[in-house]
Amino acid sequence: MDIQHLRNVGIIAHGGAGKTTLAEALLFGAKATDRLGKVDDGSSNFDYDAEEIRRKITISTTFHHYNWNKVEVVIADTPGYINFEADTRACLSMLDGAVLVVNAVSGVEVQTEKMWTFARASDVPVLAYISKMDRERADFEKAVEEIGNILKINAVPVTLPIGKEAGFTGIVDLLRMKALVYKGDNGEFTVGEIPAEMAGDAARAHEKLVEASAESDDELIEKYLEGNDLSEEEIRKGFQAGVRAMKFLPVLCGASPRGIGIQMVLDMINFALPDPSYRGEMIGRNPKTGADEIRAISASAPFSAQVFKTLADPYAGKLSIFKIFSGTLSPEMSPLNSGKDAQERIGQILRLEGKKQKPLGSASAGEIVAVAKFKETASGDTLCDPKHPILFEPPVRIEPVISFAVRPKTRNDEDKLGSSLTRMIEEDPTLNFRKDAQTNEFILAGMGETHLEVAVEKLKRQYGVEVELRTPKIPYFETIKGKAESQGKHKKQSGGRGQYGDCWIRIEPNPRGKGFEYVDAIVGGSIPRNFIPAVEKGIVERMSRGVLAGFPMIDVKATVFDGSYHNVDSSEMAFKIAGSLAFKKAAIDAKPVLLEPIVEMEVVVPEENIGDIIGDLNGRRGRVLGVDALGKSQILKCQVPLAEVLRYSSDLRSITSGRGQFTMRVTHYEEVPGVIAEKVIAEARKDIGEETEE
């Protein structure tokens, strides 16, 4: 395929703004499909997963394509909800343009800003499309104003709406200065003159468009400032340059289900958004020498590509989706996975069409394609010509923000749990699965409660593994605040060889985070050298169970300074028991306390909710570190005990009507307040039973 006639375009937005509906309208408008797929009735070509149909949201990026005026356009319908935004970020880094959808009723929302930020970070030129223009309270002017003010970009309308709300019947094309009036809901329109009552507004908007286009080119702005008229060709040239350099954001509008404004979006994608060659080249490194390697984005350069998404297809098996940066790929090739030094077999190259795939004879630079059943290759890996190796930097891993304990329902479920989740994590790297060594629970972590609920549903549906999500146990620790000395003496005589171990230890707090420190201060041979490590083993073993509630003890310095032994009856085991006894007695006298994990949170909420959020977090023993403005939202940074925010996502959703979002990570441990510590200790002792005397 000629790279100049190729576009890779993502549809991005806040959840519910109408991304998938626009993507369906583009396919239908370009005659790539013979009926308009709909999210509401489950007939969408993009949201085809069972959970997407049930929840009516996009969970995973889906690809399709259409041909419009001899340009092949690959459309990526991306998730808009925070729980699944990592997938959007990974895909955006491989795309060459994007359409940012803004709801005409609700305007710029939290995720609208984030999607814009992701696009800017990936150097992806953007068109804005104001959707739902036929809805009650739709406000084009307000949406354009918010785009400019909140996204901090010159928002330049390319179309104006004809009519409002239910009376929305068409658009004014400000490049050609013509009116497109639609009849019915099938996307058919007639081109005519601009309505007289709109002539003044259209003229002013056209002038703004011409000015923005002129500012993108030194020659044009000079001609414009001298008062000379620019030709339509000059305006289009400046417009295209301005969009691709992201000097301004062109704004279109429409009503996607009715096809109003869709042809303008199709035309603008072809005209304003760039083909894959606009980036010029890709920089990687030689996997053997570490030296920089450069690949021109061209079909004539050696083959190179990067996998950015993995899917578990029920029929094709594991599908690896990648973008070809350079060269040409054919089915008989065996490209090198340069990061793992392994060659892969191709077999068949596939073009993605929603949930279906279409075989291709070959694919070249700029194309996004898939191959089934790679053995070694995962998301982020580089594929290349073995004779011209190159390794591209994998995307930065995004850490999960919320964890739940996973309890398999049956023994069979437990046996299959690990292998099934390993396959799911291949598809979704933002999931994390581990067994907590301290609590012995299986922990599943992800980007939010909805993310984990979807994962559990998929685990059941696709792998036949049933589990329950539970609030995980808090990984408390114990430590000491004071100093203490104690003797541990183990003496046993019951016929035959006896047991004798005797040691004195001193314990004191270590600085937070320094861990356990053992000091040998024995002089004069009161304990033989070969038994001193056994005392340490006894102390470490006792620390693993603590003295308050069975939680591990940390940040303690223990010094063994005296003791005695028996020539016949002393042994490693006897001194290990003596060390354990000495530590337990000393720890009880050294002011033991409970420590809890503290998380640092960043909560993004609408301005009107900030007071309620601060009050709620204060009630959770939180400390507010600062509040910053972000458009119509506020970013609150705070520190809160993990125990207080285990189910925070549902509470935040309730307070903000679903408009809030947050991230959190454990940063350190702090002492639990007395009253709360008493409750935790009592509960823990009830669970494990009282410790018996040794």
Image: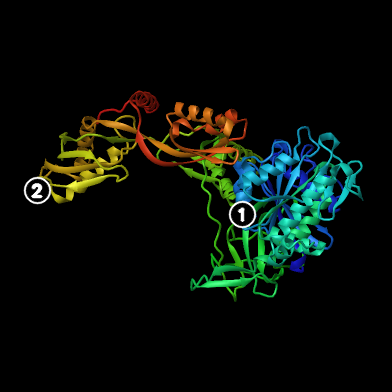
Give the mark nearer the N terminus: 1 vs 2. 1
Q: Amino acid at mark 1?
A: Arg
**Residue at image location 69% in from the left, 68% down from the top:** 365
Q: Nearer the viewer, mark 1 or mark 2?
A: 1
The disc placed on residue 120 is 1
In this view of the protein, which residue sits in the foreground, 411 or 83? 83
Image spot of residue 148 (x, y percent)? 66, 46
The quarter in which the C terminus is drawn is top left
Q: Where is 693 relative to 445, above or below?
A: above
Give how far apart the Cα atoms at labels 1 and 2 are.
67 Å
In this view of the protein, which residue sits in the foreground, 377 or 181? 181
| Horizontal relation, residue 187 to residue 557: left or right | right
In this view of the protein, which residue sits in the foreground, 669 or 679? 669
Image spot of residue 108 (x, y percent)? 66, 41
Image spot of residue 394 (x, y percent)? 55, 59
Image spot of residue 258 (x, y percent)? 85, 42
Q: Is residue 34 visible?
A: yes
Q: Which residue is mark 2?
A: 523
Circle 2 Cα neighbour tier, 10 Å, few/some/many (<14 / 14–19 / ≥20): few
| Horizontal relation, residue 56 to residue 591: left or right | right
Residue pushed farthest left? 524
Q: Amino acid at mark 2?
A: Val
**Residue at image location 35% in from the left, 30% down from the top:** 672
Circle 1 Cα neighbour tier, 10 Å, few/some/many (<14 / 14–19 / ≥20): some
| Element class at badge 2 | loop
